[in-house]
Image (cartoon, grey):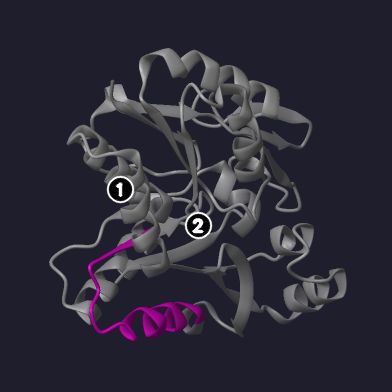
Amino acid sequence: MPVRVLTDSAAILSAEDLPQDLLVRIPLTIRADGLTFREGVDAVPPEVWPPTDRSCGFSVEPPSEDELQALYQHLAPTTSAILAVLHSGKLSPLVARARSAAAAVLGRCPVHVIDTQTMGIGQGWVVETALRLAARGQPPQEIERALRGRIPHIYTVFVTESLEALERNRLLSKTQQILGTMLGVRPFLMMEDGALLPLEKARSPEKALDKLLEFATEFSDVKRAAVLYGPARSPQEAQAFARRLREALRMPGIPVYPYGPSLAAWVGFDGLGVVIEE
């Protein structure tokens, strides 16, 4: 029986040649301004994507342990192992719940839970690798080893225009959020060991983008790169930045992707990010 790859809706999958029969996607529940919807399943209410009032907060609720147990029990008869390739365990309790739920199929179906320590396209790259290796018939232990070897080489950074999401997720204090908004500060955020950390700040949109570009050009051997943007950013701005990045890295093409509600819950609606794999 084949290995099945389980991932959550925060992962952005870009490849078109993936073995979809091996993939199981679980939606994350998004709560926003009194509304609830499942990412990747339900239509996002247009009044909150993006909201007129940027103080509107998104929160992410992963499946419960009971729901994950039921899913494992459903998959167990049709697979030799389950590889759960999930977004960072420091951003939600999904990884912890997935590991606890594995007890439901103990002795019947091995469950390998992999914390990608990121979210979005970087997570998607890891999922795509898992699917391709599973399609080749690789044992789950070897797939897990290959994925864990790749995760430390994926880097994700963002700049954002608004600070409400950072304050809501306790990355900034209320005072820092108020002062930063008054001064027009644009934080530079980095995923580090699975945590989203504000490292630097810029005082203008141009300088914020320059910091992103500077970060990317510090890598001497870039395997691939991508640009992510939120719903309050224009696709044209993201494409223009991708062209600058392509020229700086001397790469033939850099894809651009809009990010979804789960990432917006952490970064906000107007983030612009770069994901690098070295």
CB-based contact (under 8 Å), mark 1 and mark 2: no
Residue 235 shown left or right of residue 29 in the figure: left
Query: Which of the marked residues, 1 or 2, is nearer the chain's N terminus?
Result: 2
Q: Quadrant of the N terminus?
A: top left
In the rendered structure, which amino acid carries the disc numbered 2?
A: Thr
In the rendered structure, which amino acid carries the disc numbered 1?
A: Glu
Residue at the spot x=60%, y=59% of the render?
267
Q: Is residue 210 magenta?
A: yes
In the displayed structure, 141 sits above or below 136; it is: below
Residue placed farthest to the right in the image? 175
Residue at the spot x=61%, y=64% of the render?
195
Q: Quadrant of the C terminus?
A: bottom left
Q: Secondary structure at mark 2?
A: loop
What is the x, y in percent for residue 38?
59, 27
Residue at the spot x=47%, y=54% of the render?
116
**Of the numbered discs in the image, which one, if any, rests on residue 68?**
none
In the displayed structure, 157 sits above or below 103; it is: below
Residue 7 shown left or right of residue 135 in the figure: right
Magenta span: 208-227
Q: Which residue is mark 2?
A: 118
